[in-house]
Image: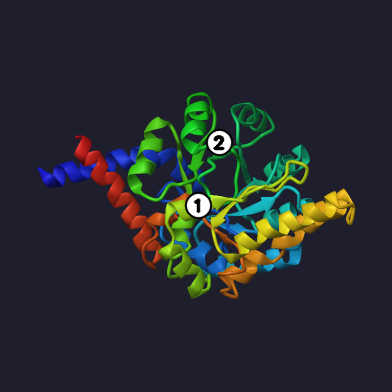
Amino acid sequence: MDTIMADAATDRLNRLMARGAVFFGSEVAVMGGAMSWISERNLVSALSNAGAFGVVACGAMEPARLAQEIAATQALTERPFGVNLITMHPMLDALVQVCLDAKVGHIVFAGGIPPGAAIKKAKDGGAKVVCFAPALALAKKLVRSGADALVIEGSEAGGHIGPVSLNVLAQEILPTMAEQVPVFVAGGIGRGEALLSYLEMGAAGAQLGTRFVCATECVAHPRFKQAFIRGAARDALPTVQLDDRFPVIPVRALQNEGTKRFLEHQGEVIRRFLAGEVAKDAAQLDIEHFWAGALRRAVIDGDVENGSLMAGQSVGMVTREQPVAEIIAELMDQARAAIRTRA
């Protein structure tokens, strides 16, 4: 009886993930979140080799550098993986061409609404296009523009975030859009039971980032990983903005000395502006430049006090360093166990 129930749970989970897995050409419908300095050849290839779908974070890379990273990733895996491109990148068109030349099958546009020309170029070149949709109206617009799939990312996620939780976005977007294109959920997902619940709501799969930071294959500095292992959900907070006149892009990260100093820095810059010592544009630029290079300092150099510890609220579920394959197996086991419990 136990074997029959286990097989039935596996079949049920595979059916729920089938659409997402087919879309990616993977075994499980789990997409790696694109994290700058972290989602590089080693983690990306490990994800794809373990049956998930790795995504290279292009970030600020120039075309030649991206071409190198794609080639290095292809040398480590024969399985499909994608590339995440920031829509505001000044060389976006050239980056799309790099992906097409390398026969990358999936291009993920992030950080804003992608230009129609970029979507068309990617699709004409044979790539599938994935876009982020923070609201239902935008989801509809992106599909009309040619998006083959959507990611809805809640404010629980790490790094740059929108204002709405995944719980709300899923209720708003999945009932309308899931029939049209595969929709992948992201933000705060750290266990298989959560993945299962969104699959049952109509999601094609999920994107996870924070959960994979402490993968054995991840190149992040040991001190960066330890900060994640020690961190709790309540420690991963969005950036605080002191004055509406000086907007701050919200970023969710673990609190450290750097976040405290950023508040002090904002206060000092605003004081100088009010005293007439600095112009508004210069003050805004000063605030924006505070975190320049901070993510690299934390991830690569291990400066966890002054660097940026971008992390999602699922960080509390990161308890130890594990191989990627083990993490994915845990997620699947948890989902199957939940199915058996319900049965």
Q: Name the quarter where the C terminus is drawn.
A: top left
Residue beneath disc 2: 164
Give the residue at x 41% y 64%. Answer: 230
Residue 124 % position (x, y): 71, 42
Q: Secondary structure at mark 2?
A: loop
Name the amino acid, label 1. Answer: Gly
Q: CA distance from mark 2 to mark 1?
A: 14 Å
Q: Secondary structure at mark 1?
A: loop
Q: Which mark is residue 64?
A: none
Question: Does residue 218 show up?
Answer: no
Picture quadrant of residue 267: bottom right
Name the amino acid, label 2. Answer: Val
Residue beneath disc 1: 312
* 176 relative to 340 in the view: left or right: right
* 173 relative to 3 in the view: left or right: right
Q: Say few, some or many: other residues with alpha carbon within 10 Å of mark 2 (under 14 / 14 to 19 / 20 or more).
A: some
- Frontmost residue, 71 versus 221: 221
Q: Say few, some or many: other residues with alpha carbon within 10 Å of mark 1 (under 14 / 14 to 19 / 20 or more).
A: many
Give the residue at x 56% y 74%. Answer: 302
State whether residue 135 is above or below residue 212. Answer: above
